Image (cartoon, rainbow, N blue to C red):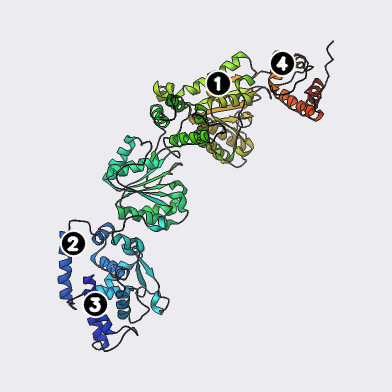
C-alpha cells in the first residue's frame, strides 16, 4: 500500500505540472491539501519520482523473496500468469476495498468527484512511465487477456461520461472473490452456493471407497499433464468418490460441481473452474452429460489442472476428453459392502449380504441408501419390528425404480406360485429360470463363465400359448419370487413409423432396465420381434434393420427379458435360437380348469354350496383369463343381490363372457 501511495505521488507531480503547481482545486470538493493529508498517513517520506519508486519496488521484491509463507498477491500472479503491470492494476483496484481514502484520491486524479473507481486511463497513468509504454500496456485490459478473461477485474461503464464507453474510460472493479482471496479468506465464491462444494485434501466422505486401480491410472496421467476425464456410470456408482480419491492421491482439495443445477449459465462453470485454480484443487463436474458441449468445452479449454466430468450417458467422440467407464462392483465387493452396511441391523442381517448382492446389481453408493430406506420404512410400519430381508428387498426395488424411457408400465405383481396352474414340466422350467437368476453371479463371475461369453449373459425366455393361459401371471410370479419389479413394454409407444425412432425407444428401455434391476415383459412380442422378410421395398429393409437391432440389444442385455406371444411361429427364428428358455403354455385341460376355478375365488369370498367347480370345468372349455373375468363378475352380481356367490351368478357371468368372445352359449343341465 505504501508503494501504491508512491505511485500516486509520482502521478501528482504530473498533475501539478498541468494545473500550475497545484493551485487549482480539482474534483470540486477535493483539495490539494486534503490529498497531501491522505497521502501523508501512509507515505511518511513520499518520493514523487521514478527513481525512488524503483528503489522501493526492489525493496518489496526482496521481502517477498525472503518470505517463508505463501503471499496472496504473488500467488495470484503465479496462478494466472500475471505480469508485474497486471499485479499493479489488481493492487490499484484492491485499494478502495481496504481504505476509503482511495475513493477521494482517485476522484482527485480523475478530476471528477463521481469517478471514485479507477479507470483504465488512471491505471495506465499510474503504472506507465511514458506514452509508448501506455500504448503497449492497453493490451492487458483486452477481454482475452488474463485479467478480464479470468474475471479478476470487471469492466464497469461510466454512465455519466460520454467517453465511458471507450476502452480508456471504462471503470475497473476487483471481483469480490478475488478480494477475499487476497485478504486470505478461505471458502468458495458465494455465487456458487447451492452449486458447488469444496472437499479438503485429506480424507474421503464416509461410505464405500471406490476401486483403487482406476484411480491409480487416472492419477498417473493427471501427474503427467493437465487432463479432462469423463466417468460414465450409473447414479450412485461412486463417480464423485473416485474423483475425490484422485484428488486425495494428488494431495489437493476437490471442488465438486452439480452440473445439472447450472443450467445454461456458463459463467458459473467458469467460476467453479477458477475456484479450482485459486484452491489448487481438482474440479469435478457431476451431470456433465446434461450440459451443452458447445458451452462446456470452451470453458475447459486451457484449464491447468485435473478436471473430472461425470454422467450416466456415454461421451461422444471428438473432444479432448478421456472417457472411462465406472463398472458396478463385482459379487465379492458388493457382498462386502452389503455386509458392512447391514452390520448392526440385527443378528441375521449380515447373513443376507450374499443373497442381496447376487439378486440386486446395485452401484456401491446406493447400497447404504437402500439400507437406510429399509430401516426407515420398518420404523414407520404400522407394526414396527426388527429389520427383515423382505424390507431390504422392497427398498432395493424403490431405489431401482425407473421410468424406462416412458414407454413401459410398471406392473403390480401379486401372483404367487400357488396361483399358477400349469403342468409340472412348465412349472419346473419356471423354477429353473428363477434358480439361474439367483446363481448367475456365482456361475458367470466366480466360476469364470462370464469371461467366455462376450454377450448373451442375461436371462431371456419366451412364453408362448393361447391368450389367457397364464403367461402374464407367470412373469408376475417370477418377479415376486425374485423380489424384482416387472415392466410391461407398451408397444404402441415403442414402434414408430419414423425411421430410427423405434431403435431409440428400445435403446432407452434396455439402458434404463439395466440400471433398474427389472424384468422386461414384452406382451404380444410377435408384433415387434416378427420374422424378417424378403426385401421388396424400403419399408421391408428398415423393418429388418429394426429386427436386427433388437437382436443386438437382446444379446447385450444382462437382465431378465420375457417375451410373450400367442403365435410362436410368427417370431423370427434368430430370436428363438438365442433365447435361453422357451415355455409353452397349453390350453388348460378339464382338470387344470377345475384347479383354476378353485384358485380364482379368494378364501374370504362367500361361496354358495351349489357352485360345482368340476361341473364348470367339464362344461366350459375356456382359458384361465376368461375364468378370472367370470369369477369377478359373478362376485359383483352376488354383491348386488346381497347374497352368497351362487351357481346362478357364475352362470350369468359366464354367459356374458361367452357373448363377449362371440362363442355359442349352452347352459349346463342341473345335476340329477
Which residue is rendered at x = 24% and y = 77% of the image? 39
Q: Residues within 10 Å of mark 2 (few under 14, many from 20)?
A: some
Residue 5 horizontal side relative to residue 366, left or right? left
Q: Which mark is residue 39?
A: 3
| Alpha carbon distance from label 4 to label 1 | 28 Å
Residue 273 in the image: state x and y as whole percent: 36, 54
Q: Nearer the viewer, residue 15 or 603?
A: 603
In the picture of the structure, the residue carrying the numbered disc 1 is 581
Do we see residue 638 in this rendering?
yes
Q: Is residue 159 left or right of residue 591?
A: left
Whichever of callouts 4 and 1 sits on the residue coming sooner in the sequence is 1
Image coordinates for residue 487, horizontal then vertical, percent: 58, 33
Instruction: Tell me the distance, in whole angstroms, between the alpha carbons under discs 3 and 4.
Output: 107 Å
Mark 1 or mark 2: whose residue is earlier in sequence: 2
CA distance separating discs 1 and 3: 92 Å
Q: Which residue is mark 4?
A: 594
Residue receiving disc 2: 64
Q: Quadrant of residue 115?
A: bottom left
Question: Residue 498: which disc?
Answer: none
Amino acid at each position: 500500500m505504501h508503494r501504491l501511495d508512491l505511485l500516486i505521488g509520482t502521478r501528482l507531480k504530473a498533475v501539478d505540472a498541468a494545473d500550475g503547481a497545484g493551485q487549482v482545486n480539482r474534483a470540486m470538493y477535493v483539495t490539494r491539501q486534503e490529498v497531501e493529508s491522505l497521502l501523508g498517513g501512509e507515505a511518511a517520506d513520499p518520493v514523487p519520482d521514478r527513481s525512488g519508486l524503483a528503489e522501493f519496488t526492489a525493496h518489496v521484491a526482496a521481502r517477498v523473496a525472503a518470505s517463508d509463507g505463501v503471499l496472496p498477491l504473488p500467488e495470484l500472479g503465479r496462478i494466472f500468469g500475471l505480469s508485474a503491470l497486471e499485479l499493479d492494476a489488481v493492487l490499484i483496484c484492491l485499494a478502495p476495498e481496504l481504505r476509503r481514502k482511495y475513493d477521494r484520491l482517485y476522484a482527485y486524479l480523475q478530476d471528477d468527484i463521481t469517478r471514485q473507481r479507477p479507470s483504465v486511463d488512471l491505471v495506465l497513468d499510474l503504472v506507465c512511465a511514458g506514452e509508448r509504454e501506455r500504448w503497449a500496456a492497453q493490451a492487458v485490459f483486452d477481454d482475452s487477456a488474463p485479467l478480464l478473461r479470468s474475471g479478476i477485474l470487471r469492466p464497469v461503464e461510466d454512465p455519466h461520461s460520454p467517453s465511458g464507453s471507450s476502452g480508456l474510460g471504462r471503470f475497473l472493479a476487483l471481483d469480490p472473490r478475488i478480494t477475499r482471496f487476497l485478504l486470505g479468506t478461505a471458502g468458495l465464491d458465494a455465487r456458487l452456493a447451492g452449486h458447488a462444494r469444496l472437499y479438503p485434501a485429506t480424507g474421503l466422505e464416509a461410505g464405500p471407497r471406490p476401486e483403487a486401480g482406476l484411480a491409480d491410472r487416472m492419477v498417473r496421467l493427471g501427474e503427467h499433464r493437465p487432463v479432462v476425464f469423463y466417468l460414465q456410470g450409473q447414479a450412485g456408482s461412486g463417480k464423485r468418490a473416485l474423483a475425490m480419491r484422485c484428488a486425495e492421491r494428488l494431495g489437493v482439495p476437490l471442488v465438486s460441481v452439480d452440473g445439472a443445477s447450472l443450467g445454461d449459465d456458463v459463467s458459473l462453470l467458469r467460476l467453479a473452474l477458477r475456484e479450482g485454480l485459486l484452491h489448487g484443487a481438482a474440479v469435478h463436474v457431476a451431470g456433465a452429460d446434461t450440459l451443452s458441449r458447445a458451452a462446456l468445452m470452451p470453458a475447459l479449454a486451457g484449464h491447468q489442472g485435473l478436471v473430472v466430468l461425470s454422467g450416466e450417458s456415454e461421451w461422444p467422440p471428438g473432444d479432448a476428453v478421456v472417457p472411462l467407464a465406472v463398472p458396478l462392483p463385482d459379487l465379492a465387493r458388493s457382498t462386502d459392502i452389503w455386509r458392512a452396511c447391514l452390520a448392526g441391523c440385527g443378528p441375521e442381517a449380515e447373513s443376507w449380504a450374499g443373497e442381496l448382492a447376487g439378486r440386486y446389481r446395485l452401484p456401491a453408493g446406493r447400497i447404504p441408501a437402500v439400507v437406510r430406506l429399509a430401516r426407515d420404512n420398518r420404523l414407520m410400519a404400522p407394526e414396527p419390528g426388527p429389520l427383515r430381508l423382505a424390507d431390504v428387498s422392497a427398498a432395493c426395488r424403490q431405489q431401482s425404480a425407473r421410468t424406462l424411457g416412458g414407454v413401459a408400465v410398471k406392473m403390480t405383481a401379486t401372483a404367487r406360485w400357488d396361483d399358477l396352474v400349469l403342468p409340472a414340466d412348465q412349472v419346473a422350467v419356471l423354477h429353473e429360470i428363477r434358480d439361474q437368476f439367483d446363481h448367475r453371479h456365482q456361475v458367470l463371475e466366480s466360476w469364470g463363465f462370464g469371461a467366455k461369453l462376450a454377450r448373451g449373459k442375461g436371462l431371456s425366455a419366451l412364453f408362448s400359448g393361447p391368450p389367457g393361459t397364464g403367461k402374464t401371471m407367470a412373469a408376475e410370479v417370477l418377479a415376486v419370487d425374485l423380489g424384482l419389479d416387472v415392466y410391461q413394454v407398451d408397444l404402441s409407444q415403442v414402434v414408430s413409423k419414423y425411421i430410427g425412432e423405434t431403435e431409440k425407444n428400445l435403446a432407452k428401455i434396455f439402458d434404463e432396465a439395466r440400471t433398474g434391476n427389472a424384468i422386461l415383459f414384452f406382451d404380444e412380442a410377435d408384433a415387434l420381434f416378427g420374422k424378417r422378410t424378403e426385401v421388396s421395398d424400403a419399408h421391408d429393409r428398415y423393418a429388418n434393420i429394426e429386427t436386427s437391432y433388437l437382436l443386438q440389444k437382446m444379446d447385450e442385455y444382462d437382465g431378465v427379458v420375457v417375451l410373450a406371444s400367442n403365435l410362436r411361429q410368427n417370431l423370427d427364428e434368430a430370436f428363438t435360437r438365442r433365447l435361453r428358455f422357451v415355455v409353452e403354455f397349453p390350453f388348460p385341460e378339464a382338470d387344470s380348469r377345475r384347479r383354476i376355478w378353485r384358485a380364482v375365488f379368494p378364501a374370504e369370498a362367500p361361496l354358495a354350496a351349489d357352485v360345482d367347480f368340476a361341473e364348470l370345468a367339464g362344461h366350459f372349455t375356456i382359458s384361465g383369463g376368461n375364468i378370472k373375468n367370470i369369477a369377478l363378475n359373478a362376485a359383483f352380481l352376488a354383491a348386488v343381490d346381497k347374497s352368497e356367490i351362487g351357481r346362478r351368478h357364475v352362470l350369468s357371468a359366464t354367459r356374458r363372457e361367452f357373448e363377449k368372445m362371440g362363442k355359442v352359449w349352452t347352459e349346463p343341465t342341473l345335476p340329477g
